[in-house]
Amino acid sequence: MKTDSPAIYADLKEKLMNARFGAGEKLKPAELQGEYGCSANTVRDVLLRLTKVGLVNFEMQRGFRAQYTSPEKRNDVTRFRTLLEQEGATLSMKLGGISWEADLTAAHHRLSHLEREFERSGDLADNPDNMKLWTNAEWSFHDTLISRCGSPMLRDIYENVYAQFRQQMVAQERDFGRSYFSAIIAEHQAVLDAALSRNVEACRAAIHDHLKRNYVEAKPLETAV
């Protein structure tokens, strides 16, 4: 039972990011209050906060629903995440010192360990606990990458965009198998190596290459008849 708002917020956010609720699934405060042992108003307040993050959709007369997903939405949020992360990493490489390098290396070590285990076992797609572990470790690495950017606003916006990205990606990805993690492991290593070497151009390219699988081709404009 999670009776305080911060705990309820964190739990619902994690479940939404990891697609524990289906896209467009109705979120009923009256039902969720029983799960969390709190009032329906508390749940409603938390859901309203999550609409500001972009993980929940609210419509008059229809209530709260888990955010809808689509390839186009995934594409849009991926492009915005790429821009923010590239800028945050560039600034961190300029402003971060040896403590930033140590923090980034530690975050990567944990992430790499988990991803290599999932590559070996293939135990992820149907295991919510492992998905949560992976999401938290992946977030920690990318958040640490931009953590010395010197802009609280960039970091706040990036956190919300990352949450939306994760929700879209997990909901739509169909293969979290060994080949998937083999590629992801190499991509994270490339980001780390470029960041530690303070190679801005290589780091920006590595971030793009890490995320490009989430892009979709732009639809051609319809020509007038």
Image (cartoon, grey):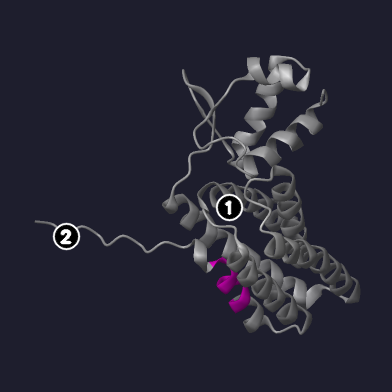
**In front: 198, or 117?**
117
Q: Quadrant of residue 155?
A: bottom right
**In front: 184, or 16?**
184
| Residue 135 shows in this picture | yes
Query: How many residues crowd mark 1 within 10 Å: few (<14), some (14–19), many (20+)?
Result: many
Q: Which residue is mark 2?
A: 223
Spatial CA span between label 1 and label 2:
32 Å
x then y, percent, for residue 45: 68, 24
Dividing the image into 4 quarters, which one contains the N terminus?
top right
Residue segment shown in magenta? 205-211
x then y, percent, for residue 209: 56, 73
In front: mark 1 or mark 2? 1
x then y, percent, for residue 158: 66, 55
Q: Which mark is residue 126?
A: none
Height in image: 39 above or below 19?
above
Magenta stretch contains residue 206: yes
x then y, percent, for residue 59: 48, 26
Magenta stretch, main secondary structure class: helix
**Residue at left offset 13%, top offset 57%:** 224
Query: How many residues crowd mark 2 within 10 Å: few (<14), some (14–19), many (20+)?
Result: few
Name the amino acid type tagged 1: Phe
Q: Which residue is mark 1?
A: 165
Name the amino acid type tagged 2: Thr
Looking at the image, is mark 1 or mark 2 earlier in the sequence? Answer: 1
